[in-house]
Amino acid sequence: MPHIPAASLWYDMPLETNTSGTGSDSQSEADQLSFFRYEWGIYLKLVRSNAMNHLDIAALLRQLIDSRLNLPFSFIDLACGDSSLAHSILDGTQVYSYIGIDLNRRALDLASDIMKDVPYDVTHFEEDMVTAIESRPDSADMIWCGFSIHHLKTPPQKQEMLDAIYRALNPGGFFVCFEPTCHADETRDSFITRGQEQVRERFSVLSDEEFAHMWDHIRAHDYPESSATWLAMGETAGFSQSREIFRMPGELFCAAYLFEK
């Protein structure tokens, strides 16, 4: 299993900013930095406790790399955050090109520092992942995205994303995502309604205030699909094989999906 440093696997909570229009620029910047540090602290607690199976996913990704990519390869990291996951799993592999894409400038600043001494080409882009992947056909042998595509509200939007990811892969390449997953025929409202107690138990390392912050994000931004829907979207996009390769334990879970071109 690859070593995962404390600051790794950026989670998907967006950095909120002061939009009130009041206060000085320096005050607004200070408020934003304070808020980032608050969210980062929540994230670190979840990683260190493995509450969202970060270690398991890192090990799984490395196993896929070792078994499938025995020649020099290129890697795209969607919603890359601080790039610590990639830094860990790519260590000692034959990767020659890494592209990390994220909208969070502070996370990308951390990523640049983490990746500064690696022996392969590194480029980071402050860019929306949908726009970014659509502009990069035939760019990667492996693409990874964790806890992010479920922010797209509708199945057609997610389908467009998978279509673009298919086009961005080189022949024989593959894509892995890790996303919240609902039961067959379950509505989003039902998923959210039954989820709070289970998520609270899973995130027991968080204080009540921290959990309330996380839950507000989930309630506002999570639009999960069923496993069958994820796999059907992969087939529609043109992938030769689409399958679930990992599932969190419990009734309310996230699952990892492998899509092979």
Image (tube, rainbow, N blue to C red):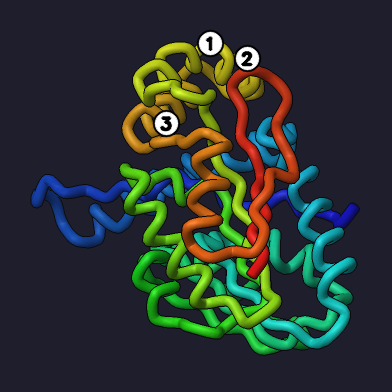
Name the residue at 49% across, 23% down: 211
Name the residue at 57% across, 47% down: 231
Query: On the picture, is 249 further left or further right than 189?
Result: right
Estimate the spatial distance between the alpha carbons at disc 1 and disc 2, rounded to whole Å.
6 Å
Mark 1 is surrounded, within 10 Å at the Cα level, by few (under 14), some (14 to 19) or many (20 or more) other residues, namely few
**Image disc number at residue 218:** 3
Give above or below for 146 relative to 26: above
Q: Position of residue 227 (x, y in %)?
A: 57, 37
Label 3: element kind: helix
| Residue 223 visible in this rendered orientation of the protein | yes
Estimate the spatial distance between the alpha carbons at disc 1 and disc 3, rounded to whole Å.
13 Å
Q: Which residue is mark 1?
A: 197
Query: On the picture, is 258 further left or further right than 160?
Result: right
| Residue 42 visible in this rendered orientation of the protein | no
Query: On the picture, is 63 further left or further right than 127?
Result: right
Residue 147 or residue 108, whichever sits in front: 147
Name the residue at 44% across, 44% down: 150
Q: Earlier in the sequence, mark 1 or mark 3?
A: 1
Mark 2 is surrounded, within 10 Å at the Cα level, by few (under 14), some (14 to 19) or many (20 or more) other residues, namely few
Q: Position of residue 214 (x, y in %)?
A: 46, 30
Residue 108 or residue 166, whichever sits in front: 166
Check disc 2 and give the amino acid type: Glu
Q: Position of residue 175 (x, y in %)?
A: 63, 63
Q: Which residue is mark 2?
A: 201
Estimate the spatial distance between the alpha carbons at disc 2 and disc 3, rounded to whole Å.
15 Å
Position of the C terminus, as image quadrant, is bottom right
Name the residue at 42% across, 65% down: 129
